Image (tube, rainbow, N blue to C red):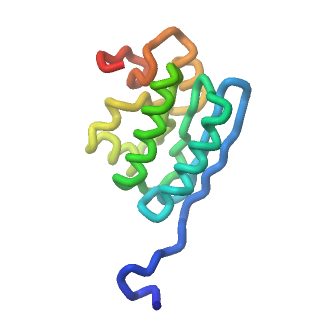
């Protein structure tokens, strides 16, 4: 099958790395988070979940694209963290990822920060899990 034919799976353009720093874990991403690469992100988030971090930060500053499949993977990770009474935050720079989160309303669901350090500092305070942007959430 040639690359021009419909249904040909394209190469995955995503890198995801897990970095542990005590109770804090960062999953750093670079590239496109979409239907083709969502499993790679899901695996990295699963690896980061072990052993049950207090704060899980997903660094999307080097991500170039995020579709609904990727959003679903992130939402599932947020749900798992909340069920354990832990935190999940996104680190996002201005650009296409920020726009996707705003358009979909997910910027009101995920706490979003400029750096992992900002997330750790804010979430280490006694706040409800998953409160957006360091603010208390009615749904938490």
- Is residue 35 shown above or below 63? below
Q: Can you give x and y, in whole percent of width and height, for residue 38 in the image?
A: 48, 56
Side (left or right) of 2 relative to 19: left
Compared with residue 132, is residue 74 higher up or lower down, i.e. above or below? below
Residue 122 lies, in percent from the top left, at: 52, 18
Where is residue 22 shown, x and y percent of the image? 73, 25
Residue 52 appears left or right of 63: right
Q: Is residue 31 left or right of residue 51?
A: left
Query: Left of 52 or right of it: where is 58?
Result: left
Residue most extreme to the top = 126
Image-quadrant location for residue 56: top right
Q: Which residue is rendered at x = 54% and y = 39% of the image?
A: 58
Decide which of 49, 115 is in the foreground and name it: 49
Quarter of image, res 26: top right
Q: Residue furthest bottom?
A: 1
134 to 116, vertically: above or below? above
Which residue is drawn at the image coordinates 64% and 33% (left, top)?
25
Q: Which residue is painted at 43% across and 15% down in the image?
A: 128
Pick the quarter of the image with the C terminus: top left
Q: How many marks?
A: 0
Residue shown at the point (46%, 25%) measured from the top left: 83
Q: Where residue 98 appears, x then y in whole percent?
A: 38, 43
């Amino acid at each position: 099958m040639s690359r021009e034919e419909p249904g040909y799976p394209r190469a995955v353009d995503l890198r995801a790395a897990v970095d542990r720093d005590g109770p804090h874990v960062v999953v750093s991403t670079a590239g496109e988070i979409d239907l083709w690469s969502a499993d790679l992100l899901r695996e990295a988030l699963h690896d980061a979940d072990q052993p049950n971090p207090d704060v899980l930060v997903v660094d999307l500053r080097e991500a170039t694209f995020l579709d609904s499949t990727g959003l679903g993977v992130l939402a599932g990770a947020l749900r798992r963290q909340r069920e354990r009474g832990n935190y999940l935050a996104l680190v996002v720079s201005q650009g296409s990822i920020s726009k996707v989160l705003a358009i979909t309303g997910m910027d009101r669901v995920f706490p979003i920060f400029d750096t992992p350090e900002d997330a750790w500092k804010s979430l280490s305070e006694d706040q409800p899990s998953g409160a957006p942007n360091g603010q208390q959430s009615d749904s938490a």
